[in-house]
Image (cartoon, helix red, strand yellow):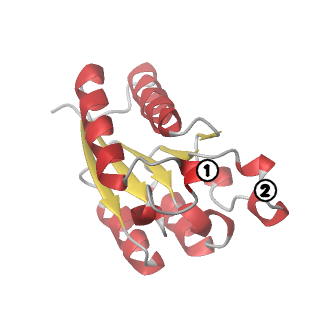
Amino acid sequence: MKILVINGVNMNMLGFREQEKYGTMTLKDLEKELYAFSFELGIDINTYQSNYEGEIVEKIHNAKEEFDGIVINAGAYTHTSIAIRDAISAVEIPTVEVHMTNIYKREEFRHHSYLSGVCLGQISGFGINSYKLGLKAIVDYLIKDNKFKQQ
């Protein structure tokens, strides 16, 4: 089973920006911990980060033949990008939306997600555990519904 983990805009600034919200863990630290967790789950993951909406859309499009599921933290694009929403919808790959912070305890404009309507679910507010819970959820979904491609 192969899962694509996408991090969107400004996620490359983890560990440096708003440490009171996101902590000191860098994106590289996050990815390292997720790779270790993927071994525990017995799955393969590939991580990707871009600050460019079109590149994220292209990555989702290209995931169609290679990945069984997607875990995505689109960052601020969550609240603005119909293009990323349409890409997720178009590829029909089971997707879980994650956020490190609880977007519903933040500014009002962050309370709306364009992605949630085309994702299996949304997990927010648990820091790196949001990603781990998202990975576990997508794996459980794919196994339960026998939707993963045999390796």
* 44 displayed left or right of 9: left
Percent of width and height locating residue 140:
44, 23
Q: In which quarter of the image is residue 139?
A: top left
Residue 15: x and y in percent read 43, 55
Give the structural element (helix, strand or loop) at label 2: helix
- Residue 111's tag is 2
Q: Name the residue under label 1.
A: 20
Q: Quadrant of residue 108?
A: bottom right
Q: Which of the two marks, 2 or 1, is nearer to us in this view? A: 1
Residue 18 picture location, percent across and down: 58, 59
How packed mark 2 is, by other alpha carbons closer than 10 Å (few <14, some 14-19, many 20 or more), is: few
The circle on residue 83 is: none
Q: Quick one: which residue is furthest to the right in this view? A: 108
Secondary-structure class at tag 1? helix
Decide which of 27, 120 is in the foreground and name it: 27
**Relative to residue 2, is residue 139 depicted above or below?**
above
